[in-house]
Amino acid sequence: MSATNSNAMNGTSASGDISASDFFGYFSAGPSKLPEEVMHKAQKEFLSYQSSRVSVMELSHRSPEYMAINDDAIACVRRIFNVPNNYKVMFMAGGGTGQFAAVPLNLSAEGKSADYCVSGTWSEKAFKEAKKFGNSNCVFSVNKFTTIPGESTWSRDKDASYLYYCDNETIHGVEFPFIPSNEGDFANVPVVADMSSNLGTRIFDVNRFGVIYATVQKNLGPAGCTIVIAREDLLGRPRSFCPSVLDYSQTSKANSLMNTPVTYSVYMTKLVMEWIEDNGGLSQMENDSKAKSQLLYDVIDSSDGFYSSVVDKMFRSRVNVVFRLKDGDEQLEAAFISAAKKNNLLSLKGHRSVGGIRASIYNAISLKMVEKLAQFMRDFQKSN
Ligand code: PMP
């Protein structure tokens, strides 16, 4: 395919082939951009996986080929996140929303309550879901989802079944810069984290957690698969009414093959994780996400209020940069989105519940593309 054949608006050729990934920026919050190399590899193997003449989509989940994909993907999670031996790694279906129920169904004990940090839409949904299965308590209250109160002010229960929080709130752009305590009075309260939008973008110590989960469609793959990392001693005591498909013990005993898994999504997630390893691993992803978000926050902070972020500086997300124009001028924001589109910078509209602009800059978004967005923001300010 020749470059002259390509469509300047969307970076594709007349036949739909991708010509140059950096040709346009796609800042979707999820499902999100996947690394181009991964897409090419998947394309190459699409019809015949490793000369089998069968697509991964067509492989039985009991076939040796698929079982190897499953094992390799689990091994990738273990390597990338340095998962200790006393933790199980699982792939589940049902997305983040499935985990809102799976967490209380697997970890809440009869008669005990669970503690929740509600710092945005996703933890609020998880908190509401947990209430269906037992008592749960919100450890702090905030008027708006723009900050996280200091840990010393939280009202935690030292006998809680677990403490739940969302490490990065994708809609509000609020990210935890610390891991809640699992020491002193709270030594017996496992910490549970929803890392759906930032797992794979920074280094952290798995030992601090009871359970970590992430739906993969932001930094780690296409929609479908949810990664769960759970400490072994927390398994084996699900509530009697926990559906098998959400049961961590059954899932881990069956090596994530209890029922038909989301095979293609697990395969793609494996490819994305291999790409992370080939591109400097977690430390490089962490450096990149710091650099990329800094670029945008610098434009915002030096714009004399033309752009503004309502999130307290300490809690600004490195992966979902949420901002307003002239304190929420919706007409100007609509003009910004439409001018951005003309410059091949797509999917920048904030979530419908909060409005404004959101640039999701996950792992597959290059620094170069974020530079392009930063330059566009400066130019747009000059002409408005
Ligand atoms: N948690 C977070 C942080 C999310 O961003 C999302 C979805 N965007 C969810 C949970 C829910 O995931 P799903 O749509 O896969 O159920």
Image (spheres, grey):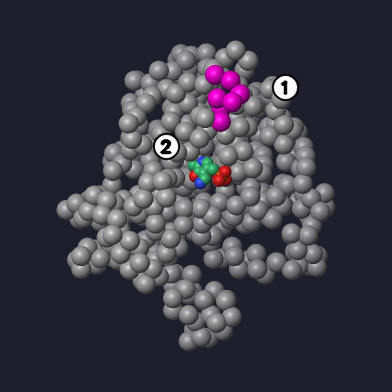
Amino acid type, callout 2: Gly
| Element type at mark 1 | loop
- Residue 113 versus residue 45 in the image, above or below: above
| Image point (65%, 38%), residue name | 89
* Residue 314 is inside the magenta segment: no
Amino acid type, callout 1: Ser
Disc 1 within 8 angstroms of ligand 1 (CB):
no
The answer to whether any part of residue 184 appears in the image is yes
**Frontmost residue, 17 versus 269:** 17
**Which residue is the site of mark 2?**
120
Q: Earlier in the sequence, mark 2 or mark 1?
A: 2
Magenta segment, principal secondary structure?
loop
The answer to whether any part of residue 297 appears in the image is no
Start-end of magenta stretch = 129-135
* Residue at far left of view: 304
Disc 2 within 8 angstroms of ligand 1 (CB):
yes
| Quadrant in the rendering for residue 341 | bottom left
**Frontmost residue, 375 versus 332:** 332
Could you say where residue 205 lies in the image, as x and y percent from the top left? 50, 34
In space, the residues marked 2 and 1 are separated at their CA atoms by: 30 Å
- Residue 358 versus residue 143 in the image, above or below: below
Could you say where residue 289 lies in the image, as x and y percent from the top left? 40, 51
Number of disc labels: 2
Q: How many residues crowd mark 1 within 10 Å: few (<14), some (14–19), many (20+)? A: few
Could you say where residue 335 lies in the image, as x and y percent from the top left? 30, 64
**Frontmost residue, 219 versus 7:** 7
**Which residue is the site of mark 1?**
240
* Residue at far front of view: 331
| Image point (33%, 35%), residue name | 144
